[in-house]
Image (cartoon, grey):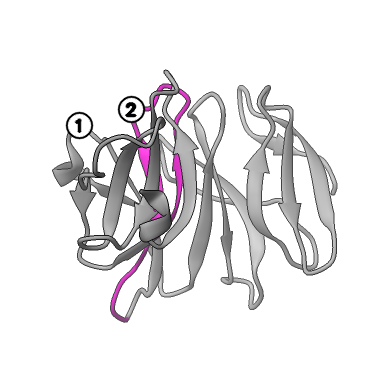
């Protein structure tokens, strides 16, 4: 089922009965698929731009995704509830390219890559306030992923993978790569 649809990534739902992925099957959006391969995927929600990379909160109640939209913004990161997708909101929407959303295990932080410094770097910002972002990478970085217990953030460069020790509470703090 999933082979027939262009996907960028897939995530298991908390109960493990479905995969949720970004795709372009019958339109760009977010799709669920039964994990046993039965049934036909039905779009959870559609977006006006093309949906790529996504990240699902541990409880499965929110999905963050990159949407490629027409200029001026281009690549932005949005978040929505699979149950109420009509209230999707922009998390990071600037004239720069933002991509690779990764939600923290506790659901409080968003790690992502952006080229606002002139090259792709990894940043973290709070989900609730959407305020200032903290740069985590040095000399480039993309595709951030948190470890399950929330103690580290991993990211890659063209030829390496880096680990950064993080302290997510009460405020976000990151060590060196």
Among the two numbered marks 2 and 1 on one chain, the one whose residue lies closer to the N terminus: 2
Q: Is residue 4 magenta?
A: no
As rendered, which of 16 and 121 lies closer to the eye?
Answer: 16
Disc number at residue 133?
A: none
Disc number at residue 83?
A: 1
Q: Which residue is mark 2?
A: 61
Quarter holding residue 20:
top left
159 left or right of 32 in image = right
Which residue is outermost to the top?
Answer: 15
Quarter holding residue 50:
bottom left
As rendered, which of 11 and 157 lies closer to the eye?
Answer: 11
Q: Are marks 2 and 1 in contact (CB under 8 Å)?
A: yes
Up the image or down, 110 lies above or below 90; here it is above
Label 2 Cα neighbours within 10 Å, binned few <14 / some 14-19 / many ≥20:
some
67 left or right of 39 in image = right
Q: Position of residue 70 (x, y in %)?
A: 28, 78
Residue depicted at x 23% and y 46%: 88
Q: Is residue 53 magenta?
A: yes
Q: Position of residue 99 (x, y in %)?
A: 51, 61
* Badge 1 element: loop
Label 1 Cα neighbours within 10 Å, binned few <14 / some 14-19 / many ≥20:
few
Q: Position of residue 4 (x, y in %)?
A: 36, 59
**Marks 2 and 1, how far apart at CA:** 8 Å
Which residue is outermost to the front?
Answer: 38
Residue depicted at x 85% and y 46%: 176
Residue depicted at x 21% and y 63%: 27
Up the image or down, 22 lies above or below 126; here it is below
Asked whether residue 27 appears in the rendered view, the answer is: yes
* Badge 2 element: loop
Residue depicted at x 61% and y 22%: 170
Q: How many marks?
A: 2
Report the magenta residues as a range: 52-71
């Amino acid at each position: 089922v999933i082979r027939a649809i262009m996907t960028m990534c897939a995530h298991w739902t908390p109960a493990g009965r479905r995969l949720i992925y970004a795709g372009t099957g019958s339109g760009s959006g977010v799709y669920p698929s039964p994990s046993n391969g039965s049934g036909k995927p039905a779009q959870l929600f559609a977006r006006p731009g093309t949906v790529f990379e996504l990240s699902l909160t541990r409880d499965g109640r929110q999905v963050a995704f990159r949407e490629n939209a027409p200029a001026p913004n281009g690549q932005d990161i949005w978040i929505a509830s699979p149950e109420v997708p009509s209230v999707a909101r922009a998390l990071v929407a600037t004239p720069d390219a933002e991509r690779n959303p990764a939600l923290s295990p506790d659901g409080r932080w968003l790690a992502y890559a952006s080229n606002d410094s002139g090259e792709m770097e990894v940043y973290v910002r709070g989900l609730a306030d959407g305020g200032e972002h903290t740069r985590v990478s040095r000399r480039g970085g993309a595709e951030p992923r948190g470890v399950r217990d929330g103690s580290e953030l991993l990211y890659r460069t063209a030829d390496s993978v880096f680990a950064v020790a993080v302290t997510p509470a009460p405020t976000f703090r990151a060590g060196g790569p």
